[in-house]
Image (cartoon, rainbow, N blue to C red):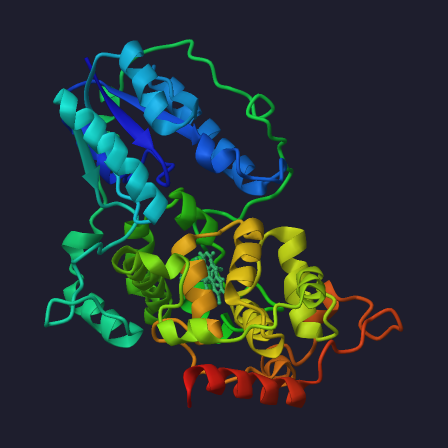
């Protein structure tokens, strides 16, 4: 008999909660990864960098496992169907997995839970990708927080070394199921092509975390840690990162708490996926002009900071946080285009795309989210530039034709757009 450990957004052998419990259980552990057909087959871009990222992470895990005389079993398909095949291939005693809080993942996991429940096979879920999950950080009245600052304060008051302790998985690595010769499907076989992206290092420099307050808002320098993709796919442990943050810089730790805040919001209020957190914002009469949307996507709005951001995104799959805020505000407020359009575009392009943070960030910018920017705050792209890219280093990098005739005129005049936005918003919100 074997226990199955199902890798999902926790692609590492070290300090992995469910893997630790699986290895300790005494039954040999067979690790499995499923390229979920629901997700993979929906990706239009066959050179999607995220698939390459996952593939590389799996290759690294495979190398480690081979050293231990074990092999990762990689499958492709619809998870329930895959598990039915796995049942034929293994005598499964139990299944171990780490919780995922996205609505699709919860529904998928519930199917697996019920399928195996009927058969008397235990499926055991663990908290791994956050320090606090579900109902662990609640208001005194037992309800979930909807405002970040009190949430963060409660989070900080609850965190003790216990919650940050790494799971010493390595001690039990000998407990993997020994087997050889399992085929590792090629990316081509999965219908994808590898990209030659250089991914950011998993472990950020301590200096970067220490100086974070001074550097975080300047897109023209390497002032943020670029760990988002690693947190997304679990190639870094949140416990390890939060421990470092706690020692080095409280502001940085608070950013990690924003991530948990949005995960918690998505868990408690899953309808934010389709609707505004503040329901009255769904009454806004969006203009939804397709030509303007296209200009925004391509970085051709004539607003240099917006265009630089969109071009950085298109070319690299990353955009600096300050610029994500500016481009999102511009789309929703200057162009009055539904935040869901922008959210979907980011979801397609961002290497670190994460439903909870992306939805949270978009609803924040549109004003419709929990604890969002007030509706009357319309970022002025010129002032933002002056404050955060005064030397135009970032803009010049992504918009080299800035001073030439080829650069488009502003798609809409700022003061006009601001006024129009306030009128449309106040009409919908009756303010
Ligand atoms: P750092 O500044 O070094 O921060 C470290 C980590 O803290 C990040 O990796 C991230 O996990 C967390 N963090 C920092 N800021 C935020 C924040 N505002 N919200 C949530 N977590 C945060 N982040 C994603 O991971 N995926 C997304 O899809 C995503 N979409 C966004 C969309 C919009 C419109 C906005 C305004 C923000 C979005 N963010 C998203 C949050 C933030 O922009 C990125 O996490 C950050 O830019 C990643 O770069 P970094 O790792 O260098 O961050």
The residue lying at 72 percent from left, 65 percent from top is 291
The residue lying at 28 percent from left, 57 percent from top is 243
Give the quadrant of the N terminus. top left
Residue 172 rendering spot, x and y as whole percentages: 21, 27
Q: Is residue 172 left or right of residue 140?
A: right
The residue lying at 29 percent from left, 63 percent from top is 247
Q: Is residue 32 above or below residue 287?
A: above
Q: Is residue 219 above or below residue 228?
A: below
Give the quadrant of the C terminus. bottom left
Name the quarter showing ligand 1: bottom left
Nearest the eye: 164 or 33: 33
Residue farthest to the right, as pictured: 405
Residue 66 rendering spot, x and y as whole percentages: 39, 18
Number of numbered discs on residues: 0
Residue 33 rendering spot, x and y as whole percentages: 38, 27
User: Image quarter for residue 332?
Assistant: bottom right
The residue lying at 26 percent from left, 23 percent from top is 4
Nearest the eye: 201 or 219: 219
Residue 23 appears in the rendering: no
């Amino acid at each position: 008999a074997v226990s199955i450990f199902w890798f999902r957004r926790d692609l590492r052998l070290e300090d992995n909660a469910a893997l630790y419990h699986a290895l300790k259980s005494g039954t040999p552990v067979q690790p499995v990864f499923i390229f979920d057909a629901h997700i993979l087959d929906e990706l239009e871009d066959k050179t999607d960098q995220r698939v390459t990222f996952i593939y590389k992470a799996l290759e690294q895990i495979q190398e480690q496992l081979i050293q231990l005389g074990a092999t990762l079993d990689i499958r492709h398909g619809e998870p329930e169907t895959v598990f039915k095949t796995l049942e034929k291939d293994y005598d499964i005693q139990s299944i171990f997995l780490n919780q995922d809080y996205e609505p699709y993942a919860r529904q998928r996991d519930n199917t697996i839970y019920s399928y195996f429940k009927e058969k008397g096979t235990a499926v055991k879920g663990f908290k791994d990708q956050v320090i606090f999950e579900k109902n662990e950080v609640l208001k005194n009245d037992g309800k979930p927080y909807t405002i970040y600052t009190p949430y963060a304060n409660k989070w900080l008051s609850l965190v003790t070394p216990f919650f940050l302790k790494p799971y010493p998985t390595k001690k039990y690595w000998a407990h993997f199921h020994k087997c050889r010769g399992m085929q590792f499907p090629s990316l081509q076989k999965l219908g994808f092509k590898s990209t030659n992206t250089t991914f950011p290092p998993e472990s950020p420099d301590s200096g970067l975390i220490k100086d974070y307050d001074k550097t975080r808002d300047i897109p023209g320098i390497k002032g943020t840690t670029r760990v988002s993709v690693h947190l997304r796919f679990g190639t870094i442990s949140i416990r390890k990162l939060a421990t470092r943050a706690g020692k080095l810089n409280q502001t940085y730790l608070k950013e990690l708490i924003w991530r948990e805040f949005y995960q918690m919001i998505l868990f408690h209020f899953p309808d934010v996926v389709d609707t505004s957190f503040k329901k009255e914002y769904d009454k806004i009469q969006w203009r939804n002009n397709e030509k303007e949307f296209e200009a925004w996507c391509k970085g051709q709005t004539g607003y240099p900071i917006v265009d630089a951001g969109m071009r950085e995104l298109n070319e690299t799959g990353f955009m600096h946080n300050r610029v994500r805020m500016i481009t999102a505000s511009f789309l929703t407020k200057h162009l009055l285009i539904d935040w869901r359009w922008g959210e979907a575009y980011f979801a397609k392009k961002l290497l670190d795309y994460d439903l909870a943070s992306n939805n949270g960030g978009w609803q924040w910018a549109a004003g419709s989210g929990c604890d969002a920017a007030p509706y009357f705050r319309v970022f002025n792209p010129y002032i933002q530039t002056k404050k955060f890219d005064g030397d135009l280093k970032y803009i010049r990098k992504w918009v080299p034709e800035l001073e030439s005739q080829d650069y488009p005129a502003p798609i809409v005049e700022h003061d006009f757009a601001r006024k129009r936005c306030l009128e449309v918003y106040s009409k919908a919100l009756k303010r």
